[in-house]
């Protein structure tokens, strides 16, 4: 691997082309995330006689580790990832198999974690990055011309990790993996008719999942609650209803930091994880939520810009995969808090509490920064 060359005498030295805008926007989102995690957990911790900064400290640790790994990812030429793609793919599949074995840890009906001391590692989050690398390498190897044969082979490989994640069962992460694959295929050379067939098959698969008893009833209820949120506000749609109340209560400027009633009284379940956006909406209002979404928009723009500037198709497709991952997660997560998308249990990147999600997002952004730094070589 060629390590980074930061020599000032070389006008094309990678460090001279670090995308500071993308880096600053990502760290800004992370800072808001730390603040909102603390706000949404402090009162509940205090009421239980526990450390009010417990979740804040853990998330800060996750963030520091994520930044260190992001820097490490930036240290070598991203072309090395093309050669590592097969090994990374096999490693991801093996870890997903192991997490479904007795070595895995179960929580709330989902077996998706390895318990490592006081911490949990969720392999499916890291699989997102592995899939980006693998699909980008495959598509770039076919030089933008994916005929039916290679496309079928690719989908066969992709079906393995997606199926294992779905089997946990974690439909939300499986949806993110599917979005990544579709995003790269659209740019990577798949023909329109093939994409249409894939779309039709995907629609049939969704209907089959909902109708054939593949999911538990509570999971079906969560996914369909947004279609009729008033049907059962005390059970399946409770999260959604409380989420909407919290966001609406914030108004234009918010109730003030640490002053949110819904947040302080823990009316919104899982607020520091999947529903973190509701804390932003209630306490910081439209202004705060708008600022956060503007930062996400800035990240999305810089990732797209890097995809356009990349020196080769592999680098461009890596960025497209990261773009698809971030856009889908932001749209789905924010949408579910407002009742316009299904409640699928997808974290908000760099905002939701969780080490695996933070680590995966930081690695993905590190890859984009890597591509940007070496776009002139």
Image (cartoon, rainbow, N blue to C red):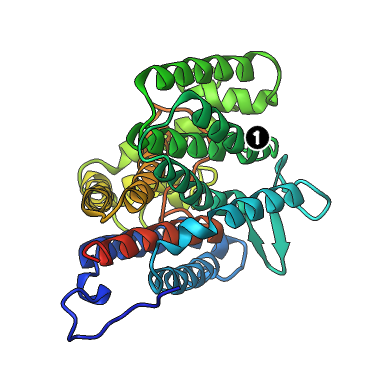
Q: How far across and how far down the image is residue 29, in percent?
A: 32, 58
- Quadrant of the image occupied by residue 18: bottom left
Q: How far across and how far down the image is residue 147, in percent?
A: 44, 27
Q: How far across and how far down the image is residue 156, in percent?
A: 60, 32
Residue lying at the far right of the rendered structure: 102
Q: Residue at x 51, y 48 (%)?
A: 134
Query: Which of the pair 375/272 is nearer the observer?
Result: 375
Q: Is residue 78 above or below residue 234?
A: below
- Quadrant of the image occupied by residue 220: top right
Q: Is residue 96 above or below residue 207?
A: below
Q: How far across and how far down the image is residue 169, in percent?
A: 67, 36
Q: Residue at x 22, y 68 (%)?
A: 20
Could you say whether the residue bearing mark 1 is in a helix, strand or loop? helix
Residue 358 seen in render: no
Q: Quadrant of the N terminus?
A: bottom left
Query: Which of the pair 67/29 is nearer the observer?
Result: 67
Query: Which of the pair 228/176 is nearer the observer?
Result: 176
- Quadrant of the image occupied by residue 108: top right
245 left or right, relative to 308: right
4 left or right, relative to 116: left
Residue at which label 1 appears? 163
Query: Which of the pair 262/227 is nearer the observer?
Result: 227
């Amino acid at each position: 691997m060629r390590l980074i060359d930061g020599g000032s005498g070389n006008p094309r030295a990678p460090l001279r082309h670090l995308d500071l805008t993308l880096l600053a926007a990502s760290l800004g989102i992370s800072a808001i995330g730390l603040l909102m995690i603390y706000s949404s957990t402090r009162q509940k911790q205090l009421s239980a006689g526990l450390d009010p900064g417990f979740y804040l400290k853990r998330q800060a640790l996750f963030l520091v580790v994520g930044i260190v790994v992001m820097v490490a990812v930036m240290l070598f030429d991203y072309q090395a990832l093309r050669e590592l793609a097969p090994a990374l793919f096999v490693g991801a599949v093996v870890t997903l198999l192991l997490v479904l074995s007795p070595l895995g840890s179960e929580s709330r009906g989902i077996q998706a974690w390895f318990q490592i001391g006081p911490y949990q590692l969720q392999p499916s989050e890291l699989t997102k990055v592995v899939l980006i690398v693998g699909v980008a390498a495959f598509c770039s190897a076919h030089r933008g011309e994916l005929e039916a044969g290679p496309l079928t082979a690719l989908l066969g490989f992709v079906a393995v990790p997606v199926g294992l994640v779905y089997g946990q069962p974690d439909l939300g992460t499986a949806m993110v993996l599917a979005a990544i694959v579709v995003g790269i295929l659209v740019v990577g050379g798949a023909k329109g008719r093939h994409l249409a067939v894939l779309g039709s098959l995907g629609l049939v698969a969704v209907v089959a999942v909902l109708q054939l008893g593949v999911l538990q009833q509570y999971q079906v209820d969560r996914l369909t609650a947004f279609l009729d949120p008033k049907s059962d506000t005390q059970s399946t749609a409770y999260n959604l209803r409380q989420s909407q109340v919290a966001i609406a209560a914030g108004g234009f400027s918010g109730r003030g930091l640490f002053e949110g009633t819904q947040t302080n009284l823990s009316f919104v379940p899982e607020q520091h994880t999947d529903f973190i956006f509701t804390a932003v909406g209630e306490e910081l209002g439209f202004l705060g939520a708008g600022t956060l979404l503007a930062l996400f928009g800035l990240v999305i723009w810089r990732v797209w810009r890097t995809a356009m500037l990349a020196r080769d198709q592999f680098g461009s497709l890596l960025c497209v995969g990261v773009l698809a991952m971030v856009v889908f997660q932001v749209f789905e997560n924010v949408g579910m808090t407002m009742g316009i998308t299904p409640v699928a249990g997808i974290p908000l990147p760099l905002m939701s509490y969780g080490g695996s999600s933070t680590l995966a997002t930081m690695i993905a952004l590190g890859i984009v920064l890597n591509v940007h730094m070496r776009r002139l070589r």
